[in-house]
Image (cartoon, rainbow, N blue to C red):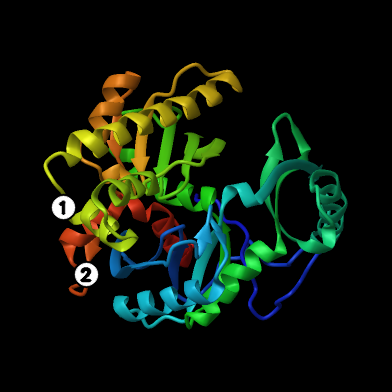
Amino acid sequence: MARQSCQYLAEAPGVKGEVIVGLFTPKKPPLVGVDISSTAVKLLQLSQAGGRYRVEHYAIEPLPPNAVVEKNIVEVEAVGEAVRRALARSGAKVKHAAAAVAGSAVITRIVPMPAELSDEDLEGQIQVEANQYIPYPIEEVSLDFEVLGPVRDNPEMNNVLLAASRTENVDMRVAALDLGGLTAAVVDVEAFAMENAFALIADQLNVGRDALVAVIDIGATMTTLSVLKNQRTIYSREQVFGGKQLTDEIMRRYGLSYEEAGRAKRKGGLPESYETEALQPFKESLVQQISRLLQFFYAGSEFSKVDQVVLAGGCASIEGISSMLEEQLGLPCVVANPLARMSLSNRVQAQSLTQDAPALMIAVGLAMRSFD
């Protein structure tokens, strides 16, 4: 069962410093998943029939430089316009959306609570508990919680997942969706959306369910390591490094604009020397960054090795990066494709979708919220 979290009620905007009732409640209207990254808006809508998913609509729309900086929306109007363009280009007609805030913007804690508490009493107690864990004024925070189940060996207590984010982090995404013509039905956490999407690829891996899997999402400016066990995140860490470093090097070395460099990186047309002068050094730096992230995990946990590495994000599609990682880390490594077993509507171009699939993990996880 995918973890649900941080659902935003559009009919109750501006609720600050209090539990927003119903945030974990499933939503009935169909949703489009909208992943707002540092360089693009990724939009995806799924349908489901007979237990199988189908991609109905999708689009990726680039963002202007610095509209989003390290996953924080800086220019909400520019992001809203990109959402509008993506929605139009995808052909989707839905009005409700699911977006996500970065894991670094969310505090999560599992708190034991008496199982006998009523919903109303639980909400009140969550307020008290939140004050202990949140380092900023409670009136600036949006809260959510979910009862996970009994505490092991103590059935009189329940484990309750508490999630808290500064309200401005939620409000900026809600505002961008609104400007793009969508109503925010759900604001999730990226790590939980990644868990949802990971469930689609877990049985494609040659490891057991209880194996340690490192999902490494390599975006434009951030690389995020999520370590999962039993398909639940047990560790997450972000590192400021991503594909923009390669784009910047192409701009500098070949005298191209930001847009030209990005296009050349994706579609080709660069000099033969590009492979050795720019791409190979970037790949080596990327391997070093991933190795460093894994070392941080090992140093702070009881584990000394993961069983599987899964690459996601735009840079996962770089030719040879998976085999290079496998060779240098000594770990089996695959490129994520959460859409591999989905059917496609006739509006979706299969070749483009396959190329973009590793970058759509969060968008897929958000789109799956339609079926909670």
Badge 2 crowding class, 10 Å Cα cut-off, few under 14, some 14 to 19, many 20 or more, is some
Residue type, mark 1 in image = Gly
Label 2: element kind: loop
Q: In this view, does 351 lie to the left or right of 118?
A: left
Badge 1 crowding class, 10 Å Cα cut-off, few under 14, some 14 to 19, many 20 or more, is few
| Number of residue marks | 2
Q: In this view, does 356 lie to the left or right of 65?
A: left
Label 1: element kind: loop
Q: What x and y, as percent, mark residue 329?
A: 35, 21
- Res 356 label: none
Q: Please tell me which residue lies in front, 284 or 175.
A: 284
On the image, numbered disc 2 is attached to which residue?
348
Q: What x and y, as percent, mark residue 30?
A: 44, 74
Sequence-first disc among 2 and 1: 1
Q: What x and y, as percent, mark residue 332?
A: 30, 26
Q: Are marks 2 and 1 in contact (CB under 8 Å)?
A: no
Residue drawn at x 41%, y 38% is: 216
Residue drawn at x 81%, y 52% is: 136
Q: Please tell me which residue lies in front, 38 or 344.
A: 38
Between label 2 and label 1, give the one nearer the viewer: 1
Q: What x and y, as percent, mark residue 76?
A: 55, 72
Q: Please tell me which residue lies in front, 80 or 250.
A: 250
> Does residue 101 lie above or below 151 as drawn?
below
Observer able to see residue 202: no
Residue type, mark 2 in image = Val
Residue drawn at x 45%, y 19% is: 305
Q: In this view, does 2 lie to the left or right of 328?
A: right
On the image, numbered disc 1 is attached to which residue?
268
Tell me the CA gap for discs 2 and 1.
23 Å
Q: Please tell me which residue lies in front, 234 or 173.
A: 173
